[in-house]
Amino acid sequence: TANSETPDLKGWVRRTDPAMEKWRDNRFGCFIHFGTYSILGGQWNGKEVPGAAEWIKVGGRIPSAEYDKLVKQFTLENFDAKKWAADIRRMGAKYVIITTKHHDGFCLWDSKLTDYDIGSSPTKHAVLKELADAVRAEGMDMYFYYSIIDWHHPDYRAADPKTPEDQAAYARYLEFMKGQLKELLTDFGDIKGLWFDGRWDASYKNHPDIGKGLEAWLRELKPGIVLGDRVRAYDSFADYNSGYERKLPKTQPLLDWEACMTIPENSWGYHKTWSGVGRKTPKTLLEMLVRSAAMSGNFVLNIGPKGDGSFNEKDVERMEPIGVWMKSNGASIYGTEGLALTLPAGTYATRKDDKVFIHAFQWPETDKLPVKGLPGKIKSCTLMTKDGAKSIRFEGETLLDLPLTAPDVLDSVFTLEIEK
Ligand code: H79
């Protein structure tokens, strides 16, 4: 059967409308995983629970009666939507995706359709509304994540429903989902798109018509909405392939795509210790962003704020240097597409109009950088340094007289102006 890695392109149409062009131009997004699991930070009864922190209810086999008590601890005394949005904008992200409801079913907004939501918690913050407004005030686009899987709703079914009772229950659940999605697209201002997750249960996976129907309904409700392919079962794509989770494609995909990435090995929600195999450095994360742009895709970096509503310092430590880099080098990312050139290892290319950007993560061991396959003759070449863009000599397609060391510890960018 088809999956994210073996795309069946049949029937897929590349959207060229302004909403989709904007999604492409954004290139860099920020994912936020936030819910009552954020209070636990990957620990239960003083012990670390293996696996992702947002899965702790399953990983720690926490009884619902215990887990549900977390709602009463969701006080968010340090939550500040404007600060969240400002920090994310400073990192250089152009869009934000937040978990409105993760698999545990807890809703980050006061939904009329359930009491298992922030409205039943002690906090006075209307997290979703405050954040959506703050994100837009910072000039970014707001997207909502919504889990199809729901461990809390009594009518949710994971198995393919066979009995009339189960079928009726699951039908009610799908109506509940539509009701919630309508709230999300109605009560929070302009939401650019939805990011679905949890399509692998048989109840959804075995019935592609459910996803297709939902998608058609959403497009009618909100013309121009941008939908990742996880709204569908695995048979085909919506607007873009959202299957690149904690990985990047190996080669340039044929269709629009987006990768989402965790900083620790595999935890999206706040985790106190980040145990696991690895924790990525700012350079590693930036290289993933650049490689994504160089393959004409979007990159979404995930952060997991703490249960009190403040950011995790370990996330901030990475957001800040990426933001400093983006501030001087954003032109080499936003609105660009990838370009297949022959380049030395650790070097990538993006392009926009008559400009080609060469990103050197690995600084050449010689004073030359050979480029092969440019779409035209080089007119001018500069290299970004701490003191601004410096002119670089070139001969044919080879850049000459490079400084001994990389001017940027993360990614040094050459800007080539190409003759039309
Ligand atoms: O929200 C983050 C994760 O919590 C969520 N998606 C990101 C964005 C996610 N949850 N699980 N996964 C991603 C991967 C799922 C793996 C499994 Fe399974 C689900 C393992 C067991 C159940 C896949 C499906 C393998 C067997 C069934």
Image (tube, rainbow, N blue to C red):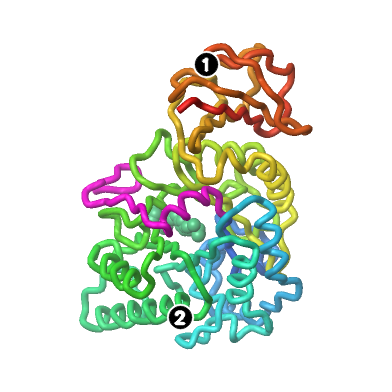
Residue 293: in magenta span: no
Q: Earlier in the sequence, mark 1 or mark 2?
A: 2
Residue nearest the viewer, comparing 41 with 117: 117
Disc 2 target residue: 183
Q: Position of residue 307 (x, y in %)?
A: 68, 69
Residue on which the image places disc 1: 397
Residue 306 appears in which quarter of the rendering?
A: bottom right
Q: Residue at x 47, y 76 (%)?
A: 184
Tag 2 secondary structure? helix
Residue 289, visible in the rendered structure = yes
Q: Position of residue 40 (x, y in %)?
A: 66, 67
* Residue located at (47% from left, 65% from top): 192
Vertical arrangement, residue 243 with respect to residue 105, above or below:
above
Quarter of the image with the C terminus is top left
- Can you tell me whether the CB of the residue at mark 1 lies under 8 Å from the nearest atom of ligand 1? no
**Segment colored magenta:** 1-29
Q: Main secondary structure of the magenta part?
A: loop
> Mark 2 belongs to which amino acid?
Glu
